[in-house]
Image (cartoon, grey):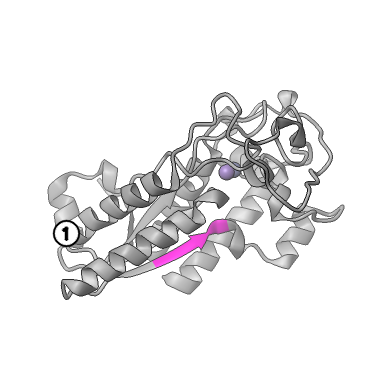
Amino acid sequence: MNTVSIEKMDWVTYRELTEKGNRKIILPVGAIEQHGPHMSLNPDVLIPSYIGEKVAEKAGNMLVAPAITYGYKSQVKSGGGNFFPGTTCVSGSSLENYVFDVLRAYVNHGNREFILINGHFENSMSLCEAADKLVNQCRAEGITVKVYLLSYWDFISEETIAKVFPDGFTGWAVEHGGVLETSIMLKIHPELVDMSKAVDVAPATFPPYDVFPADPSWVAPSGTLSSPLKATAEKGELILDECISGIVHHLG
Ligand code: ZN
Ligand code: MN
């Protein structure tokens, strides 16, 4: 069996591939979070997992680890909020420790380089903490480890944005459940998208602060922060191609 996916390998194959420590291990990190009534709860998991697999296939010197499924608490201004049924999140310390433990296990197998592909904005700082802690702990033991941390949307160029949002781009902050994620899901998992249930909403606007407890009236009842109606699989393919080739170009 020829695969880049660690979870699909037998342990002997995995050992052969990793014992020299020259494979970069990709760890997708997502979240279980509502993305509107038209889409499953797991785009933040499936998108970085798909990108990770394609990057590893293209690069030839990488393997993909099983994704971290649960992520840091959905915030109103980036993910609709932690109060939606189905949105199922963990604290920053849990995520940090869990990611750290997983990376540490891969280090113990002999791996030395990691690429964290983040699919959920709110995870970012917990992943910084996990990476920082891993590098420091390993250094104290005389092991040199390198961790690259990226969010896939940072690889999307102005040209692609202009093609995907011909009517004007309202910013990544309101792309939760909108054209970006819906287009990618239409490309990679059309069976998890039902465009007949997509709700047209104006791009969300928020006050320049957060409030706790969260105020559900800040978010459209459908849960997306912008409209998914103009999503297409073609747009998804365009976005994915650029993210995949960009990551391979920089880190391959
Ligand atoms: Zn998302
Ligand atoms: Mn998210």
Asked where in the image residue 146 lies, by quadrant, the reply is: bottom left
- Residue 250 position, x and y percent, is 48, 73
In the rendered image, residue 149 lying in the magenta stretch gets the answer: yes
The quarter of the image that holds ligand 2 is top right
Q: Residue at x 49, y 53 (%)?
A: 51
Residue 61 in view: no
Describe residue 195's horizontal placement relative to residue 43 as left or right: right
Residues packed near mark 1 inside 10 Å, few (<14), some (14 to 19) or many (20 plus) = few
Q: Is the magenta region chiefly helix, strand or loop?
A: strand
Query: Which of the pair 239/102 is nearer the observer?
Result: 102
* Residue labelled 1 has its Cβ within 8 Å of some atom of ligand 2: no
Where the N terminus falls, by quadrant? Answer: top left
Q: Residue at x 27, y 42 (%)?
A: 8
- Residue 29 position, x and y percent, is 44, 49
Residue 19 in view: yes
**What is the span of residues highlighted in magenta in the rendered image?**
148-152
For label 1, the SS is: helix
- Residue 252 position, x and y percent, is 41, 70
The residue under label 1 is 108
Query: Which of the pair 8/82 is nearer the observer?
Result: 82
- Residue 34 position, x and y percent, is 60, 32
- Measured along the vertical axis of the image, is residue 35 above or below residue 249? above
In the rendered image, residue 154 lying in the magenta stretch gets the answer: no
